[in-house]
Image (tube, grey):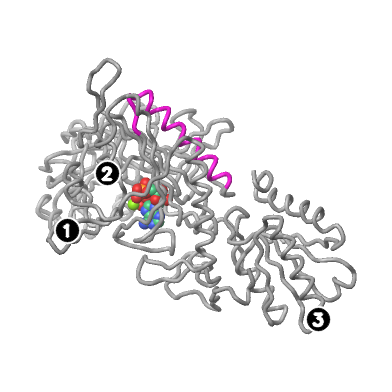
Protein backbone atom coordinates (compact mmCIF):
# COMPACT_ATOMS: atom_id res chain seq x y z
CA UNK A 1 0.00 0.00 0.00
CA UNK A 2 1.25 3.46 -0.87
CA UNK A 3 0.90 6.03 1.90
CA UNK A 4 0.22 8.67 -0.74
CA UNK A 5 -3.01 6.82 -1.61
CA UNK A 6 -4.01 5.76 1.91
CA UNK A 7 -7.11 7.29 3.43
CA UNK A 8 -5.75 7.85 6.93
CA UNK A 9 -6.63 11.37 8.02
CA UNK A 10 -4.35 11.96 11.00
CA UNK A 11 -5.08 14.66 13.56
CA UNK A 12 -2.75 16.91 15.52
CA UNK A 13 -5.12 17.03 18.47
CA UNK A 14 -7.22 14.27 20.02
CA UNK A 15 -11.01 14.76 20.00
CA UNK A 16 -12.04 16.85 22.98
CA UNK A 17 -14.22 14.18 24.58
CA UNK A 18 -11.54 11.46 24.34
CA UNK A 19 -10.61 10.36 27.87
CA UNK A 20 -8.49 7.27 27.39
CA UNK A 21 -5.33 6.89 25.39
CA UNK A 22 -6.67 4.33 22.91
CA UNK A 23 -9.51 6.64 21.91
CA UNK A 24 -7.17 9.61 21.54
CA UNK A 25 -4.59 7.73 19.53
CA UNK A 26 -6.99 5.77 17.32
CA UNK A 27 -8.63 9.04 16.31
CA UNK A 28 -5.33 10.88 15.87
CA UNK A 29 -3.76 8.08 13.84
CA UNK A 30 -6.72 7.98 11.47
CA UNK A 31 -8.02 4.53 12.45
CA UNK A 32 -11.53 5.58 13.50
CA UNK A 33 -13.97 8.46 13.44
CA UNK A 34 -16.96 9.04 15.66
CA UNK A 35 -20.35 9.39 14.00
CA UNK A 36 -22.32 10.01 17.15
CA UNK A 37 -22.16 8.98 20.80
CA UNK A 38 -20.82 5.41 21.03
CA UNK A 39 -20.98 4.85 17.26
CA UNK A 40 -17.83 4.79 15.15
CA UNK A 41 -16.68 4.45 11.58
CA UNK A 42 -13.67 2.22 10.97
CA UNK A 43 -11.32 3.85 8.46
CA UNK A 44 -9.00 1.65 6.36
CA UNK A 45 -6.32 1.27 9.04
CA UNK A 46 -8.87 0.60 11.76
CA UNK A 47 -10.78 -1.89 9.67
CA UNK A 48 -7.63 -3.80 8.78
CA UNK A 49 -6.80 -4.08 12.49
CA UNK A 50 -10.37 -5.09 13.32
CA UNK A 51 -10.38 -7.76 10.63
CA UNK A 52 -7.11 -9.19 11.87
CA UNK A 53 -8.50 -9.60 15.35
CA UNK A 54 -11.64 -11.18 13.91
CA UNK A 55 -9.64 -13.57 11.75
CA UNK A 56 -7.49 -14.84 14.60
CA UNK A 57 -10.60 -15.34 16.71
CA UNK A 58 -12.29 -17.15 13.80
CA UNK A 59 -9.31 -19.45 13.31
CA UNK A 60 -9.31 -20.44 16.96
CA UNK A 61 -13.07 -21.00 16.97
CA UNK A 62 -12.83 -23.25 13.94
CA UNK A 63 -9.83 -25.06 15.43
CA UNK A 64 -11.99 -25.76 18.49
CA UNK A 65 -14.71 -27.26 16.31
CA UNK A 66 -17.16 -24.36 16.09
CA UNK A 67 -18.85 -23.44 12.80
CA UNK A 68 -19.45 -19.91 11.59
CA UNK A 69 -22.94 -18.60 10.87
CA UNK A 70 -24.35 -15.12 10.52
CA UNK A 71 -27.53 -14.48 12.46
CA UNK A 72 -29.86 -11.55 11.81
CA UNK A 73 -29.29 -8.33 13.66
CA UNK A 74 -32.97 -7.45 13.73
CA UNK A 75 -34.85 -9.74 16.10
CA UNK A 76 -38.60 -10.11 16.72
CA UNK A 77 -39.85 -9.39 20.24
CA UNK A 78 -41.73 -12.73 20.42
CA UNK A 79 -38.48 -14.65 20.94
CA UNK A 80 -37.39 -12.32 23.72
CA UNK A 81 -40.76 -12.67 25.39
CA UNK A 82 -40.33 -16.45 25.47
CA UNK A 83 -37.30 -16.08 27.74
CA UNK A 84 -38.69 -13.13 29.69
CA UNK A 85 -35.83 -10.91 28.61
CA UNK A 86 -38.07 -8.47 26.70
CA UNK A 87 -38.95 -7.09 30.15
CA UNK A 88 -35.75 -7.97 31.96
CA UNK A 89 -33.14 -6.55 29.57
CA UNK A 90 -34.10 -2.94 30.21
CA UNK A 91 -33.04 0.09 28.27
CA UNK A 92 -29.90 -1.34 26.70
CA UNK A 93 -32.21 -3.14 24.29
CA UNK A 94 -33.02 -0.83 21.40
CA UNK A 95 -36.64 -1.56 20.45
CA UNK A 96 -38.62 -0.37 17.47
CA UNK A 97 -41.66 -1.12 15.34
CA UNK A 98 -41.82 -2.06 11.68
CA UNK A 99 -44.45 -0.72 9.25
CA UNK A 100 -46.91 -3.40 10.34
CA UNK A 101 -46.41 -2.28 13.90
CA UNK A 102 -44.67 -5.48 14.96
CA UNK A 103 -42.09 -5.07 17.73
CA UNK A 104 -38.40 -5.70 17.10
CA UNK A 105 -35.04 -5.06 18.69
CA UNK A 106 -31.47 -4.72 17.49
CA UNK A 107 -29.53 -7.73 18.76
CA UNK A 108 -27.38 -6.96 21.82
CA UNK A 109 -26.66 -10.70 22.03
CA UNK A 110 -28.14 -13.74 20.28
CA UNK A 111 -29.16 -16.47 22.76
CA UNK A 112 -32.83 -16.31 21.70
CA UNK A 113 -32.17 -16.35 17.96
CA UNK A 114 -29.66 -19.21 18.09
CA UNK A 115 -31.82 -21.29 20.44
CA UNK A 116 -34.75 -20.80 18.08
CA UNK A 117 -32.62 -21.92 15.14
CA UNK A 118 -31.34 -25.01 16.89
CA UNK A 119 -34.65 -26.10 18.44
CA UNK A 120 -36.21 -26.08 14.97
CA UNK A 121 -33.51 -28.20 13.37
CA UNK A 122 -31.87 -30.44 15.93
CA UNK A 123 -33.87 -33.54 16.81
CA UNK A 124 -31.45 -36.24 17.82
CA UNK A 125 -28.50 -36.73 20.15
CA UNK A 126 -26.55 -37.65 17.03
CA UNK A 127 -26.56 -33.99 15.99
CA UNK A 128 -24.92 -32.95 19.27
CA UNK A 129 -22.64 -31.47 20.44
CA UNK A 130 -23.02 -28.42 18.27
CA UNK A 131 -21.16 -25.12 18.50
CA UNK A 132 -22.11 -22.21 16.24
CA UNK A 133 -20.46 -18.81 16.20
CA UNK A 134 -20.63 -15.52 14.39
CA UNK A 135 -18.71 -12.27 14.13
CA UNK A 136 -21.24 -9.54 14.07
CA UNK A 137 -22.24 -6.00 14.90
CA UNK A 138 -24.13 -5.76 18.16
CA UNK A 139 -26.16 -2.85 19.42
CA UNK A 140 -26.53 -2.01 23.10
CA UNK A 141 -27.93 1.32 24.12
CA UNK A 142 -25.31 1.71 26.85
CA UNK A 143 -26.19 4.29 29.48
CA UNK A 144 -22.70 5.78 29.30
CA UNK A 145 -20.95 5.02 26.03
CA UNK A 146 -17.35 6.12 26.52
CA UNK A 147 -13.68 5.38 26.10
CA UNK A 148 -13.93 5.15 22.31
CA UNK A 149 -14.05 1.56 21.12
CA UNK A 150 -14.12 0.20 24.67
CA UNK A 151 -17.73 0.93 25.50
CA UNK A 152 -19.70 1.62 22.36
CA UNK A 153 -23.34 1.34 21.53
CA UNK A 154 -22.54 -0.32 18.22
CA UNK A 155 -19.62 -2.76 18.36
CA UNK A 156 -18.30 -5.96 16.85
CA UNK A 157 -18.54 -9.12 18.89
CA UNK A 158 -17.73 -12.73 18.27
CA UNK A 159 -20.40 -14.81 19.94
CA UNK A 160 -20.48 -18.59 20.06
CA UNK A 161 -23.17 -20.90 21.45
CA UNK A 162 -22.74 -24.55 22.35
CA UNK A 163 -25.43 -27.21 22.66
CA UNK A 164 -24.79 -30.48 24.46
CA UNK A 165 -26.64 -33.59 25.55
CA UNK A 166 -25.72 -33.28 29.17
CA UNK A 167 -23.81 -31.39 31.79
CA UNK A 168 -20.59 -33.32 31.30
CA UNK A 169 -20.71 -32.56 27.57
CA UNK A 170 -21.34 -28.88 28.30
CA UNK A 171 -18.28 -28.84 30.55
CA UNK A 172 -16.16 -30.20 27.71
CA UNK A 173 -17.51 -27.50 25.35
CA UNK A 174 -16.81 -24.84 27.98
CA UNK A 175 -13.26 -26.05 28.44
CA UNK A 176 -12.76 -26.10 24.67
CA UNK A 177 -13.81 -22.47 24.42
CA UNK A 178 -11.73 -21.47 27.44
CA UNK A 179 -8.68 -22.98 25.76
CA UNK A 180 -9.51 -21.40 22.40
CA UNK A 181 -9.78 -18.00 24.08
CA UNK A 182 -6.44 -18.47 25.77
CA UNK A 183 -4.83 -19.31 22.43
CA UNK A 184 -6.49 -16.40 20.64
CA UNK A 185 -5.53 -13.78 23.23
CA UNK A 186 -1.95 -15.09 23.28
CA UNK A 187 -1.72 -14.85 19.51
CA UNK A 188 -3.06 -11.30 19.70
CA UNK A 189 -0.07 -10.35 21.86
CA UNK A 190 -2.21 -9.34 24.86
CA UNK A 191 -1.25 -9.60 28.53
CA UNK A 192 -4.38 -11.06 30.04
CA UNK A 193 -5.84 -13.08 32.86
CA UNK A 194 -8.85 -15.37 33.05
CA UNK A 195 -10.90 -14.59 36.14
CA UNK A 196 -13.92 -16.13 37.81
CA UNK A 197 -16.90 -13.95 37.12
CA UNK A 198 -20.51 -13.30 37.91
CA UNK A 199 -22.92 -14.48 35.22
CA UNK A 200 -24.74 -11.15 34.93
CA UNK A 201 -27.88 -10.58 32.88
CA UNK A 202 -27.03 -13.34 30.41
CA UNK A 203 -27.71 -15.71 33.28
CA UNK A 204 -26.50 -19.22 33.85
CA UNK A 205 -24.39 -20.81 36.48
CA UNK A 206 -20.68 -20.60 35.76
CA UNK A 207 -18.45 -18.12 34.01
CA UNK A 208 -14.98 -16.73 33.43
CA UNK A 209 -13.99 -13.35 32.10
CA UNK A 210 -10.82 -12.73 30.14
CA UNK A 211 -9.27 -9.49 31.26
CA UNK A 212 -6.61 -7.48 29.52
CA UNK A 213 -4.53 -5.95 32.30
CA UNK A 214 -4.44 -2.17 31.97
CA UNK A 215 -4.67 0.71 34.41
CA UNK A 216 -7.54 2.25 32.44
CA UNK A 217 -9.72 -0.86 32.78
CA UNK A 218 -13.24 -0.40 34.11
CA UNK A 219 -13.13 -3.71 35.97
CA UNK A 220 -11.28 -4.54 39.14
CA UNK A 221 -9.69 -7.95 39.52
CA UNK A 222 -8.64 -9.55 42.77
CA UNK A 223 -5.71 -11.87 42.19
CA UNK A 224 -3.73 -14.03 44.57
CA UNK A 225 -0.11 -13.00 45.06
CA UNK A 226 1.12 -16.47 46.03
CA UNK A 227 3.37 -18.19 43.58
CA UNK A 228 1.62 -21.21 42.17
CA UNK A 229 -1.90 -20.07 43.14
CA UNK A 230 -3.76 -18.80 40.10
CA UNK A 231 -6.89 -17.62 41.91
CA UNK A 232 -8.28 -14.52 40.23
CA UNK A 233 -11.81 -13.21 40.27
CA UNK A 234 -13.55 -10.00 39.46
CA UNK A 235 -14.74 -7.88 42.33
CA UNK A 236 -18.35 -9.04 42.02
CA UNK A 237 -17.26 -12.60 42.48
CA UNK A 238 -14.14 -12.53 44.68
CA UNK A 239 -15.10 -14.11 47.96
CA UNK A 240 -14.30 -12.11 51.08
CA UNK A 241 -12.78 -14.44 53.63
CA UNK A 242 -13.89 -13.74 57.21
CA UNK A 243 -11.27 -13.57 59.90
CA UNK A 244 -11.69 -16.30 62.51
CA UNK A 245 -14.50 -15.11 64.77
CA UNK A 246 -13.25 -14.38 68.25
CA UNK A 247 -15.77 -14.57 71.08
CA UNK A 248 -17.72 -11.31 71.00
CA UNK A 249 -17.38 -8.97 73.92
CA UNK A 250 -20.75 -8.65 75.65
CA UNK A 251 -21.86 -5.05 75.62
CA UNK A 252 -24.22 -3.02 77.80
CA UNK A 253 -27.68 -2.13 76.49
CA UNK A 254 -27.60 0.22 73.55
CA UNK A 255 -28.25 3.89 74.16
CA UNK A 256 -28.98 6.95 72.10
CA UNK A 257 -26.30 9.60 71.64
CA UNK A 258 -26.75 12.90 69.85
CA UNK A 259 -24.63 13.22 66.69
CA UNK A 260 -25.74 16.54 65.27
CA UNK A 261 -24.87 16.95 61.59
CA UNK A 262 -22.72 13.78 61.52
CA UNK A 263 -23.86 11.79 58.49
CA UNK A 264 -20.99 9.81 57.00
CA UNK A 265 -19.14 6.93 58.62
CA UNK A 266 -15.99 9.06 58.79
CA UNK A 267 -17.82 11.92 60.48
CA UNK A 268 -19.50 9.68 63.04
CA UNK A 269 -16.30 7.73 63.76
CA UNK A 270 -14.33 10.96 64.29
CA UNK A 271 -17.10 12.47 66.40
CA UNK A 272 -17.34 9.46 68.72
CA UNK A 273 -13.62 8.71 68.66
CA UNK A 274 -14.14 5.15 67.40
CA UNK A 275 -12.59 3.24 64.47
CA UNK A 276 -14.73 3.11 61.28
CA UNK A 277 -14.90 -0.68 61.68
CA UNK A 278 -17.16 -0.16 64.70
CA UNK A 279 -19.66 1.95 62.77
CA UNK A 280 -22.40 0.08 60.94
CA UNK A 281 -23.06 1.19 57.40
CA UNK A 282 -26.78 0.75 56.75
CA UNK A 283 -27.66 0.96 53.08
CA UNK A 284 -31.22 0.93 51.85
CA UNK A 285 -32.27 -0.60 48.56
CA UNK A 286 -35.36 -1.01 46.49
CA UNK A 287 -35.09 -4.70 45.61
CA UNK A 288 -37.72 -5.78 43.09
CA UNK A 289 -40.04 -3.22 44.63
CA UNK A 290 -39.45 -4.13 48.30
CA UNK A 291 -37.50 -2.23 50.95
CA UNK A 292 -34.25 -3.97 51.92
CA UNK A 293 -31.59 -2.80 54.36
CA UNK A 294 -28.05 -4.12 53.95
CA UNK A 295 -25.35 -3.81 56.60
CA UNK A 296 -21.59 -3.75 56.21
CA UNK A 297 -18.81 -2.59 58.49
CA UNK A 298 -18.08 1.12 58.16
CA UNK A 299 -14.67 0.51 56.64
CA UNK A 300 -16.07 -1.85 53.96
CA UNK A 301 -17.74 -1.36 50.61
CA UNK A 302 -20.99 -3.13 49.86
CA UNK A 303 -21.01 -4.89 46.50
CA UNK A 304 -24.40 -4.54 44.82
CA UNK A 305 -23.96 -7.59 42.60
CA UNK A 306 -23.20 -9.75 45.64
CA UNK A 307 -26.29 -8.34 47.30
CA UNK A 308 -28.39 -9.07 44.24
CA UNK A 309 -27.11 -12.65 44.07
CA UNK A 310 -27.53 -13.22 47.80
CA UNK A 311 -31.17 -12.17 47.52
CA UNK A 312 -31.79 -13.94 44.21
CA UNK A 313 -33.14 -10.60 43.01
CA UNK A 314 -33.50 -9.24 39.49
CA UNK A 315 -33.54 -5.51 40.11
CA UNK A 316 -31.54 -3.81 42.87
CA UNK A 317 -31.55 -0.04 43.16
CA UNK A 318 -30.21 2.24 45.83
CA UNK A 319 -33.21 3.78 47.56
CA UNK A 320 -34.01 7.37 46.64
CA UNK A 321 -33.74 10.00 49.41
CA UNK A 322 -37.55 10.05 49.50
CA UNK A 323 -37.67 6.28 50.06
CA UNK A 324 -35.00 6.49 52.76
CA UNK A 325 -36.95 9.16 54.59
CA UNK A 326 -40.23 7.25 54.26
CA UNK A 327 -38.73 3.96 55.48
CA UNK A 328 -36.60 5.31 58.34
CA UNK A 329 -38.80 8.27 59.25
CA UNK A 330 -35.57 10.25 59.52
CA UNK A 331 -33.41 12.35 57.25
CA UNK A 332 -30.84 10.61 55.04
CA UNK A 333 -27.71 9.63 56.96
CA UNK A 334 -29.27 8.21 60.12
CA UNK A 335 -30.57 4.79 59.03
CA UNK A 336 -29.85 1.86 61.32
CA UNK A 337 -31.09 -1.71 61.82
CA UNK A 338 -32.56 -1.32 65.31
CA UNK A 339 -36.32 -1.00 65.12
CA UNK A 340 -36.21 -0.54 61.36
CA UNK A 341 -39.15 -2.00 59.54
CA UNK A 342 -38.12 -3.23 56.09
CA UNK A 343 -39.09 -6.36 54.24
CA UNK A 344 -35.61 -7.86 54.66
CA UNK A 345 -32.55 -7.04 56.71
CA UNK A 346 -29.33 -8.57 55.40
CA UNK A 347 -25.85 -8.24 56.80
CA UNK A 348 -22.35 -9.02 55.66
CA UNK A 349 -21.31 -12.29 57.28
CA UNK A 350 -18.35 -10.58 58.89
CA UNK A 351 -20.90 -8.91 61.19
CA UNK A 352 -22.22 -12.20 62.51
CA UNK A 353 -21.95 -11.96 66.31
CA UNK A 354 -20.65 -8.37 66.25
CA UNK A 355 -21.20 -6.23 69.35
CA UNK A 356 -20.33 -2.74 70.54
CA UNK A 357 -21.39 -1.23 67.23
CA UNK A 358 -22.60 2.24 66.40
CA UNK A 359 -25.68 2.46 64.19
CA UNK A 360 -27.96 5.18 62.89
CA UNK A 361 -30.94 5.67 65.24
CA UNK A 362 -33.54 6.24 62.51
CA UNK A 363 -33.92 9.69 64.03
CA UNK A 364 -32.41 13.02 63.02
CA UNK A 365 -28.98 13.82 64.44
CA UNK A 366 -28.73 10.67 66.59
CA UNK A 367 -26.94 7.33 66.66
CA UNK A 368 -27.14 4.28 68.88
CA UNK A 369 -23.99 3.04 70.58
CA UNK A 370 -23.35 -0.38 72.12
CA UNK A 371 -25.44 -2.17 69.54
CA UNK A 372 -25.30 -5.97 69.70
CA UNK A 373 -26.52 -7.03 66.31
CA UNK A 374 -27.92 -10.39 67.37
CA UNK A 375 -29.59 -8.94 70.45
CA UNK A 376 -30.89 -5.65 69.03
CA UNK A 377 -31.88 -6.38 65.45
CA UNK A 378 -33.43 -9.19 63.48
CA UNK A 379 -31.06 -10.02 60.65
CA UNK A 380 -32.79 -12.26 58.08
CA UNK A 381 -29.66 -13.29 56.27
CA UNK A 382 -25.89 -13.13 56.72
CA UNK A 383 -24.04 -13.36 53.40
CA UNK A 384 -20.85 -12.34 51.64
CA UNK A 385 -21.83 -8.80 50.67
CA UNK A 386 -18.67 -6.76 50.72
CA UNK A 387 -16.02 -6.16 48.08
CA UNK A 388 -12.60 -7.55 48.89
CA UNK A 389 -9.79 -5.05 49.32
CA UNK A 390 -6.04 -5.12 48.92
CA UNK A 391 -4.60 -7.51 51.50
CA UNK A 392 -7.75 -9.59 51.98
CA UNK A 393 -6.98 -13.29 52.02
CA UNK A 394 -7.21 -15.58 49.01
CA UNK A 395 -10.16 -17.94 49.48
CA UNK A 396 -8.05 -20.83 48.14
CA UNK A 397 -4.68 -20.47 49.84
CA UNK A 398 -5.13 -17.65 52.38
CA UNK A 399 -2.30 -15.53 50.93
CA UNK A 400 -2.89 -11.78 50.43
CA UNK A 401 -4.90 -10.72 47.41
CA UNK A 402 -3.95 -7.78 45.27
CA UNK A 403 -6.30 -5.62 43.20
CA UNK A 404 -5.57 -4.72 39.58
CA UNK A 405 -7.54 -3.09 36.80
CA UNK A 406 -8.64 -4.95 33.71
CA UNK A 407 -10.54 -4.56 30.47
CA UNK A 408 -12.96 -7.39 29.81
CA UNK A 409 -12.31 -8.70 26.31
CA UNK A 410 -13.98 -12.08 26.53
CA UNK A 411 -16.54 -13.91 28.58
CA UNK A 412 -17.40 -17.60 28.68
CA UNK A 413 -20.63 -18.75 30.35
CA UNK A 414 -21.98 -22.13 31.14
CA UNK A 415 -25.65 -21.37 30.69
CA UNK A 416 -27.10 -24.72 31.61
CA UNK A 417 -30.80 -25.00 30.79
CA UNK A 418 -31.76 -21.35 31.17
CA UNK A 419 -32.59 -20.65 27.53
CA UNK A 420 -33.15 -24.16 26.22
CA UNK A 421 -35.77 -24.83 28.89
CA UNK A 422 -37.57 -21.53 28.42
CA UNK A 423 -37.61 -22.02 24.66
CA UNK A 424 -38.13 -25.76 24.69
CA UNK A 425 -34.96 -26.74 22.83
CA UNK A 426 -35.08 -30.50 23.24
CA UNK A 427 -33.72 -33.59 21.49
CA UNK A 428 -34.30 -37.32 21.60
CA UNK A 429 -31.58 -39.13 23.50
CA UNK A 430 -30.23 -42.61 22.82
CA UNK A 431 -32.88 -44.15 25.05
CA UNK A 432 -35.65 -42.40 23.10
CA UNK A 433 -36.32 -39.94 25.92
CA UNK A 434 -36.81 -36.26 25.24
CA UNK A 435 -34.17 -34.12 26.95
CA UNK A 436 -33.38 -30.41 27.19
CA UNK A 437 -30.13 -29.27 25.60
CA UNK A 438 -27.42 -27.90 27.87
CA UNK A 439 -26.04 -24.64 26.57
CA UNK A 440 -23.00 -22.43 26.85
CA UNK A 441 -22.32 -19.01 25.35
CA UNK A 442 -19.02 -17.34 24.65
CA UNK A 443 -18.38 -13.73 23.68
CA UNK A 444 -15.31 -11.84 22.54
CA UNK A 445 -15.27 -8.06 22.16
CA UNK A 446 -13.55 -7.92 18.79
CA UNK A 447 -13.63 -4.14 18.43
CA UNK A 448 -12.85 -3.62 22.12
CA UNK A 449 -9.67 -5.68 21.66
CA UNK A 450 -8.29 -3.14 19.20
CA UNK A 451 -8.59 -0.50 21.93
CA UNK A 452 -7.42 -2.82 24.73
CA UNK A 453 -4.24 -3.69 22.82
CA UNK A 454 -3.48 0.02 22.61
CA UNK A 455 -4.18 0.67 26.28
CA UNK A 456 -1.42 -1.85 26.95
CA UNK A 457 0.93 -0.70 24.22
CA UNK A 458 1.57 2.93 23.43
CA UNK A 459 3.90 5.81 24.23
CA UNK A 460 3.75 9.58 23.91
CA UNK A 461 4.42 9.37 20.19
CA UNK A 462 1.60 7.01 19.33
CA UNK A 463 0.39 3.46 18.96
CA UNK A 464 2.40 0.28 19.25
CA UNK A 465 0.39 -2.30 17.43
CA UNK A 466 1.05 -5.98 18.11
CA UNK A 467 2.29 -7.58 14.86
CA UNK A 468 -0.79 -9.79 14.67
CA UNK A 469 -3.20 -6.83 14.92
CA UNK A 470 -1.29 -4.09 13.10
CA UNK A 471 -2.99 -3.01 9.87
CA UNK A 472 0.38 -3.48 8.12
CA UNK A 473 3.41 -5.12 9.65
CA UNK A 474 6.04 -2.89 8.05
CA UNK A 475 6.28 0.86 7.55
CA UNK A 476 8.79 1.36 4.76
CA UNK A 477 9.89 4.97 4.80
CA UNK A 478 11.56 6.22 1.67
CA UNK A 479 13.57 9.41 2.29
CA UNK A 480 13.83 9.99 -1.43
CA UNK A 481 13.55 13.76 -1.78
CA UNK A 482 14.73 14.32 -5.32
CA UNK A 483 16.71 11.07 -5.32
CA UNK A 484 15.03 8.81 -7.87
CA UNK A 485 17.37 5.94 -6.99
CA UNK A 486 16.08 5.85 -3.38
CA UNK A 487 12.46 5.89 -4.56
CA UNK A 488 13.11 3.10 -7.04
CA UNK A 489 14.95 0.97 -4.49
CA UNK A 490 12.18 1.45 -1.97
CA UNK A 491 9.65 0.30 -4.56
CA UNK A 492 11.75 -2.80 -5.21
CA UNK A 493 12.03 -3.58 -1.51
CA UNK A 494 8.31 -3.14 -1.05
CA UNK A 495 7.60 -5.60 -3.87
CA UNK A 496 10.13 -8.03 -2.44
CA UNK A 497 8.54 -7.93 1.01
CA UNK A 498 5.04 -8.23 -0.42
CA UNK A 499 6.16 -11.21 -2.48
CA UNK A 500 7.19 -12.78 0.85
CA UNK A 501 3.60 -12.20 2.10
CA UNK A 502 4.41 -9.22 4.28
CA UNK A 503 2.00 -6.33 4.48
CA UNK A 504 3.86 -3.11 3.84
CA UNK A 505 2.90 0.54 4.01
CA UNK A 506 5.35 2.39 1.77
CA UNK A 507 5.66 6.04 2.69
CA UNK A 508 6.20 7.45 -0.78
CA UNK A 509 4.87 10.89 0.10
CA UNK A 510 6.67 14.05 -0.77
CA UNK A 511 7.07 15.03 2.89
CA UNK A 512 9.94 16.01 5.15
CA UNK A 513 11.64 13.09 7.00
CA UNK A 514 10.41 14.47 10.34
CA UNK A 515 6.79 14.30 9.21
CA UNK A 516 7.21 10.74 7.99
CA UNK A 517 8.86 9.59 11.22
CA UNK A 518 6.17 11.23 13.30
CA UNK A 519 3.38 9.60 11.31
CA UNK A 520 5.11 6.21 11.42
CA UNK A 521 5.35 6.38 15.21
CA UNK A 522 1.77 7.59 15.52
CA UNK A 523 0.31 4.84 13.32
CA UNK A 524 2.43 2.37 15.22
CA UNK A 525 3.25 -0.41 12.78
CA UNK A 526 5.59 -2.86 14.55
CA UNK A 527 8.53 -2.62 12.11
CA UNK A 528 9.91 0.55 10.56
CA UNK A 529 12.39 0.42 7.69
CA UNK A 530 14.03 3.68 6.68
CA UNK A 531 15.84 3.99 3.36
CA UNK A 532 17.77 7.19 2.66
CA UNK A 533 20.33 8.33 0.07
CA UNK A 534 23.34 7.84 2.37
CA UNK A 535 22.24 4.41 3.44
CA UNK A 536 21.71 3.36 -0.13
CA UNK A 537 25.24 4.48 -0.98
CA UNK A 538 26.56 2.36 1.93
CA UNK A 539 24.24 -0.51 1.02
CA UNK A 540 22.22 -0.47 4.26
CA UNK A 541 18.71 0.23 5.45
CA UNK A 542 17.75 1.18 9.01
CA UNK A 543 15.31 -1.07 10.85
CA UNK A 544 13.47 -0.02 14.02
CA UNK A 545 11.24 -1.99 16.36
CA UNK A 546 8.38 0.34 17.31
CA UNK A 547 7.84 -1.41 20.65
CA UNK A 548 11.37 -1.52 22.03
CA UNK A 549 12.81 1.35 20.01
CA UNK A 550 15.74 -0.89 19.04
CA UNK A 551 17.40 0.30 15.84
CA UNK A 552 19.77 -1.62 13.64
CA UNK A 553 21.17 -1.45 10.13
CA UNK A 554 20.34 -4.27 7.77
CA UNK A 555 22.45 -4.91 4.67
CA UNK A 556 20.64 -4.46 1.38
CA UNK A 557 22.75 -7.28 0.03
CA UNK A 558 21.32 -10.33 1.79
CA UNK A 559 18.38 -8.27 3.03
CA UNK A 560 15.87 -11.13 3.13
CA UNK A 561 17.84 -13.14 5.69
CA UNK A 562 18.77 -10.15 7.84
CA UNK A 563 15.19 -8.91 7.79
CA UNK A 564 13.81 -12.31 8.78
CA UNK A 565 16.05 -12.30 11.85
CA UNK A 566 15.10 -8.77 12.81
CA UNK A 567 11.43 -9.62 12.35
CA UNK A 568 11.72 -12.68 14.57
CA UNK A 569 13.20 -10.45 17.31
CA UNK A 570 10.32 -8.01 16.98
CA UNK A 571 7.80 -10.82 17.36
CA UNK A 572 9.72 -12.13 20.33
CA UNK A 573 9.49 -8.72 22.01
CA UNK A 574 5.71 -9.22 21.83
CA UNK A 575 5.95 -12.67 23.37
CA UNK A 576 4.92 -14.12 20.02
CA UNK A 577 6.76 -17.23 18.96
CA UNK A 578 7.42 -16.92 15.26
CA UNK A 579 5.57 -15.04 12.55
CA UNK A 580 2.80 -17.18 11.14
CA UNK A 581 2.61 -19.60 14.03
P1 LIG B 1 -19.42 -5.25 30.25
O1 LIG B 1 -19.42 -5.78 31.65
O2 LIG B 1 -18.11 -4.63 29.84
O3 LIG B 1 -20.61 -4.40 29.93
P2 LIG B 1 -20.80 -7.53 29.29
O4 LIG B 1 -20.72 -8.46 30.42
O5 LIG B 1 -22.02 -6.74 29.06
O6 LIG B 1 -19.55 -6.52 29.32
P3 LIG B 1 -20.93 -9.65 27.32
O7 LIG B 1 -22.38 -9.57 27.18
O8 LIG B 1 -20.33 -10.82 27.98
O9 LIG B 1 -20.37 -8.29 27.97
O10 LIG B 1 -20.27 -9.44 25.88
C1 LIG B 1 -19.13 -10.13 25.40
C2 LIG B 1 -17.98 -9.19 25.14
O11 LIG B 1 -18.37 -8.09 24.32
C3 LIG B 1 -17.43 -8.54 26.40
O12 LIG B 1 -16.52 -9.39 27.02
C4 LIG B 1 -16.78 -7.29 25.87
O13 LIG B 1 -15.47 -7.57 25.45
C5 LIG B 1 -17.61 -6.94 24.66
N1 LIG B 1 -18.52 -5.82 24.94
C6 LIG B 1 -19.61 -5.82 25.75
N2 LIG B 1 -20.20 -4.62 25.77
C7 LIG B 1 -19.46 -3.82 24.93
C8 LIG B 1 -19.56 -2.46 24.52
N3 LIG B 1 -20.55 -1.68 24.95
N4 LIG B 1 -18.65 -1.98 23.64
C9 LIG B 1 -17.66 -2.76 23.19
N5 LIG B 1 -17.50 -4.05 23.54
C10 LIG B 1 -18.39 -4.59 24.40
MG1 LIG C 1 -22.56 -4.78 29.52
Pick the front one: 347 or 426 = 426
Q: Nearer the viewer, mark 1 or mark 3?
A: 3
Residue located beneath label 1 in the image: 321
Q: Residue 447 placed where, x, y %?
A: 45, 57
* Label 1 Cα crowd, 10 Å radius (few <14 / some 14-19 / many 20+): few
Pick the front one: 413 or 511 = 511
Residue 483, numbered label? 3
Mark 1 or mark 2, earlier in chain:
2
Q: Residue 77 placed where, x, y %?
A: 18, 51
Q: Residue at x 38, y 29 (%)?
A: 129
Q: Residue at x 78, y 74 (%)?
A: 488
Is residue 15 found inside the magenta-colored segment of the image? no
Is residue 263 at least partly visible in the picture?
no
Q: Residue at x 66, y 74 (%)?
A: 518
Residue located beneath label 2 in the image: 280
Instruction: State the CA–CA distance, disc 1 to disc 3.
Output: 74 Å
Assign a secondary structure to mark 2: strand
* Label 3 Cα crowd, 10 Å radius (few <14 / some 14-19 / many 20+): few
Q: Nearer the viewer, mark 3 or mark 2?
A: 3
Mark 3 or mark 2, earlier in chain:
2
- Would you say 138 lies left or right of 563 here? left
Quadrant location of the C terminus?
top right
Q: Nearer the viewer, mark 1 or mark 2?
A: 1
Q: Is residue 246 above or below residue 182?
A: above
Amino acid sequence: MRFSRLYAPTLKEAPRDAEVVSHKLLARAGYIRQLTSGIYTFLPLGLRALNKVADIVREEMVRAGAQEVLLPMVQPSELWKETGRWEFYGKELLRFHDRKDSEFCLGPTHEEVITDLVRNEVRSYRQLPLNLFQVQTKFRDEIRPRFGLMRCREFVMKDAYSFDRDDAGADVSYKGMYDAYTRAFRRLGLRFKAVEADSGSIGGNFSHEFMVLAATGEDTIAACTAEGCDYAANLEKAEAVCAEASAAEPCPPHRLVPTPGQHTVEEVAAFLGLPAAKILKTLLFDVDGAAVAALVRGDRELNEIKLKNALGATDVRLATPEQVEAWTKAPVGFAGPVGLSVSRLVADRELCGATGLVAGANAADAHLVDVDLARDAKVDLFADLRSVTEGDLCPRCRTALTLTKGIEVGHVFKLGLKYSKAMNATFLDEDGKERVMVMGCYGIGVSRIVAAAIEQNHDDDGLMMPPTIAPFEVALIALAGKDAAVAARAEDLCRELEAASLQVLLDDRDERPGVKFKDADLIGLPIQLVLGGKGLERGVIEAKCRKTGTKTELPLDGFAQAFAEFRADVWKSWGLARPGE
